[in-house]
Image (tube, helix red, strand yellow):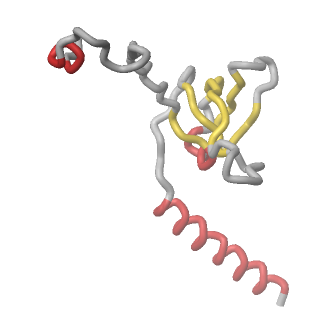
Amino acid sequence: MHKKIKANLDTAAAVSKEYFNRKAQTCNLTVNDLVLLTNTGKVNKIQPDFIGPYIIMDASRIAENVITMDSLHAPGRPQTISMLHLKPFTPRPANKVFELKAGGRHPGENVEETMTTD
């Protein structure tokens, strides 16, 4: 009876694993790529959804969806993490700086001069 239960559990685990692998999205991550980690300790909507960036130190177990990464801000404590909790890091482009004149248009200014942008 125990053998039959174990066989059924193994079959259920195999089916579940096959279904998960079919639906899982894969990322092409390599060593020295920057990634963000899902913030699982998020308790309110103000906290960020992802924390990081982290750098990938070891991708030898990438077939098992597991990598080793280290923080850029506090290096020296590598973590082994499932790739399900990661997303690639893309830096934000710097915003253009706008110079605004205080008080709007000044008397004697031409309207066309204030409307043009360089």
The quarter of the picture where residue 72 lies is: top right
Q: Residue at image x 41%, y 19%? A: 103
Q: Residue at image x 70%, y 82%? A: 8
Q: Is residue 66 visible?
A: no
List the single residue furthest toward the right. Answer: 2
The quarter of the picture where residue 116 lies is: top left
The quarter of the picture where residue 87 lies is: top right
The quarter of the rendered structure image containing the C terminus is top left
Of 66 and 70, nearer the camera is 70
Of 60 and 41, nearer the camera is 41
Residue 73 image position (x, y, % from top left): 73, 19
Query: How many tags in the picture?
Result: 0
Q: Is residue 8 left or right of residue 110?
A: right
Residue 46 image position (x, y, % from top left): 68, 46
90 above or below 65? above
Residue 16 image position (x, y, % from top left): 60, 71
